[in-house]
Each structure stands twice: as C-alpha cells, then as structure tokens.
Amino acid sequence: MFVYILGGFLGSGKTTLLMKLASMYSKKGTKVAIVVNEAGEVGVDGATLKAEGYDAIELPDGCICCTLSGTLQHALQSIKKDIDPDVIIIEPTGLALPHKVETLVRTSMIDPEETIIIGVADIQRFDDLIKKKEEFFKRQMFGANFILINKADLASPEQLASAAAYLKREYPDKLIISVSNKTGQNLDKVYELMKE
C-alpha cells in the first residue's frame, strides 16, 4: 500500500489533483481510499467524492497534523481494516505541514510500503506567497518528494521559469514539474512517478 499526501496552500489545486489521481488509479483497477481534511475550506467534500464512487473519509473542523492527529491515525487504521486499499491519498488542509502528516501516517500502524508527499505550488499566487508567507511555504514544501507548479496554463514561460528557479535554489534535490491540474498539462509526467 502506498500513501500520497498532497501539500500546498489554500487554492493551490490539491483537490483537482486528488480527483485526477483517484481517476487515474480507478481506471487501472487500483483500489483507492481518500482522506480529505477540509478545516472550513470550500472544496470537494467526502460526500462528493463518495458520489463519484470513491471510498472517502472526511475529517472536518481541525487540522490533521495537530488537533486531529489522533482522528487521522484512527481513520487510517479503519481504512486499512475495512477497505484495504492499494493506495491512500490524503489531502490535508492548506494550513497543514505535510511532513507532520507523514509522521502521523508512519506511526499509525498501517505500515505503508512508501509515503510520498507531493508539493503543490500555485503559480498565480507564487510571488505573493513568497513575499508574505515565505517561511510557511518553505516548511510546507520541505518534506515533498517532488513539487508541482500548478496552473501552468495561466502563466507566462517567464513566470514559470522564475518560480522553478526559486524552487531549485531552495530544494536542489527535488524534481520540479510545471503542470495544469485543470487541463491535464504535464500530468502524464506526474502519473509516471505514481506507484501502485
């Protein structure tokens, strides 16, 4: 079983990515379970995901890397026992630190083969985020196995190059991919990195 954690600020495109990944796995016949932590955000909720045919658990009203840590661990244990999926995709709130969520996954006794963090950065708000919340953004991306610069369809090549250069400076060991979760641009490169 593989666990994917989607990390990124509010509105970065994590939910759209989650839906694309879940769909990609479903088409292959891979059993997927989804954990969504809304924390008051407007997004795709557990009921919507269930209506799409996915096994989804929603953890509202709190952040899974702090106030809901025990709830997340219990949810993961229930998922393993009741669903036994091949893949679990976790979408924490945009205020979560994905590496803390990863620690909770590792201590939840579900024993995944691998836990992978996908960092999602919004190119439209990238410069603003770096100006106003740089330390928080860097902490969010810190544990990522690779980072997606999302909404590439709405950005100029110069904007994308500038964001990629910043991320390469900060995280020289990480793969950086410009994508559009909405249009599917470059998502084939992301799918190639996914395990099952």
Image (cartoon, rainbow, N blue to C red):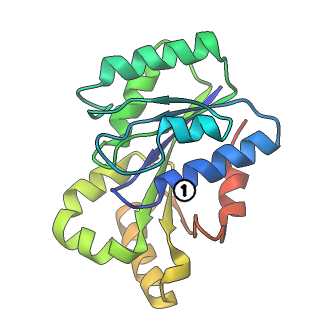
In the rendered image, the quadrant that contains the N terminus is top right
Mark count: 1
Q: Is residue 191 left or right of residue 58?
A: right
Q: Dot 1 surroundings within 10 Å: few (below 14), some, or many (20 or more)?
A: some
Q: Kindly identify the amino acid type of the residue bearing the numbered disc 1.
A: Thr
Relative to 4, does residue 169 appear above or below in the rendering?
below
Q: Which residue position holds label 1? A: 16
Q: Going 66% across and 41% down the picture, which residue do you hit?
A: 52
Q: Is residue 96 visible?
A: yes
Relative to 5, does residue 84 appear above or below in the rendering?
above
Q: Is residue 117 left or right of residue 37?
A: right
Q: Residue 44, how many percent across, how many down?
A: 48, 47
Comparing 43 with 161, the one in front is 43
Give the residue furthest to the left. Answer: 132
Q: Residue 105, how many percent across, how many down?
A: 45, 25
Relative to 142, does residue 126 appear above or below in the rendering?
below
Q: Going 47% across and 82% down the picture, which residue do you hit?
A: 161
Q: Quadrant of residue 28?
A: top right
Q: Is residue 115 left or right of residue 134?
A: right
Q: Is residue 24 left or right of residue 135?
A: right
Q: Residue 141, how many percent across, how many down?
A: 37, 53
